[in-house]
Image (spheres, helix red, strand yellow):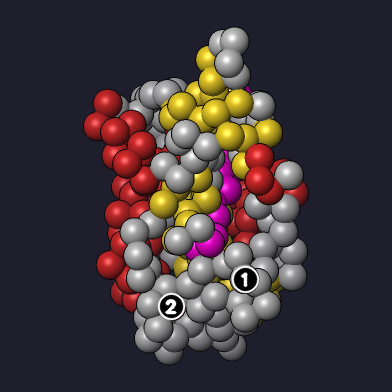
Amino acid sequence: MADWRFDGFDAAGLAAHLALPACELHERVGSTMDVAHAAAERGAPAGTLILADAQDAGRGRGGKRWASLPGRGLWMTLIERPQSPRGLDVLSLRIGLLLADALDPVAGGRVGLKWPNDLVVAGRKLAGTLVEARWRDQRVDWIAIGIGLNVTAPHDLSEAAGLVSGTSRLAALERVMPALRSAAQGEGPLTDGEVVRFTARDVSVGRRIVQPAVGVVAGISAAGELMVDTGDARLACRSGSLVFAEEE
């Protein structure tokens, strides 16, 4: 851990640069999420960042794996310790919304959002997020916010997007961190303004899907639900992955 530097920074220097209480830098791990949960269990404070050059078993929703190649992206997990569980149900959407705002200038195009946790550019996946909470005595003890962001798109994945050529990992991280910390402070359901802003970036509205329900996407609710018109009714889907009909 101590031998690897992130774009010239050691762990202490990067923490100071980002105004964080602590950073852990790893050349290679299975998953930064697993490392973060272990660190949080040992008492790591809110704002602790776990960052790896590569992951062997980076994971997304539903057990999906993320290509986490050395030097090509941000493979990271942030530990937060919210005072209240209010807002956890919509946290992944808030994260996506604020990340999209932050990354627009270096994404080479407008960043779109795909419920519940993907960021896309021109139909290709730029980033994915994953939020996991741990509870103690009926209160949330910590949350782990995992991010996989392609700074440089993998050459062998035509469906993957990257940032504008010349964007460094440090420059991307400087944009990502304030967005994550701000999203983690949000409480309660999405505001009307947040719903409007999400809808403006939503790449699925009006498209036919086969999961998590069969129908046409009508948008999202303030509670973070995916609204799907089936023809007979409008369903509110709280969980699952969105699969477009043409991808089936």
Q: Residue at x 30, y 54 (%)?
A: 101
Q: Which mark is residue 169?
A: 2
Residue 174 visible to the viewer: no
Residue 180: x and y in percent read: 39, 52
Q: Residues within 10 Å of mark 2 (few under 14, many from 20)?
A: many
Q: Which residue is drawn at 47% across and 34% down?
A: 206
Q: Name the N-terminal-most of marks 1 and 2.
A: 1
Quadrant that contains the C terminus = top right
Q: Which amino acid does label 1 sit on?
A: Ser
Instruction: Give left or right: position of 166 versus 196.
Output: right
Q: Do the residues labelled 1 and 2 touch (CB within 8 Å)?
A: no
Q: What element carries label 1?
A: loop
Q: Which residue is drawn at 27% across and 26% down?
A: 192
Disc 1 designates what residue? 158
Magenta span: 124-137
Residue 89: x and y in percent read: 50, 29
Quadrant that contains the N terminus = bottom right
Q: What residue type is labelled 2?
A: Arg
**Does residue 188 lie above or below 58 as drawn?**
above
Instruction: Give left or right: position of 99 versus 246.
Output: left
Specify whether residue 98 is painted magenta: no
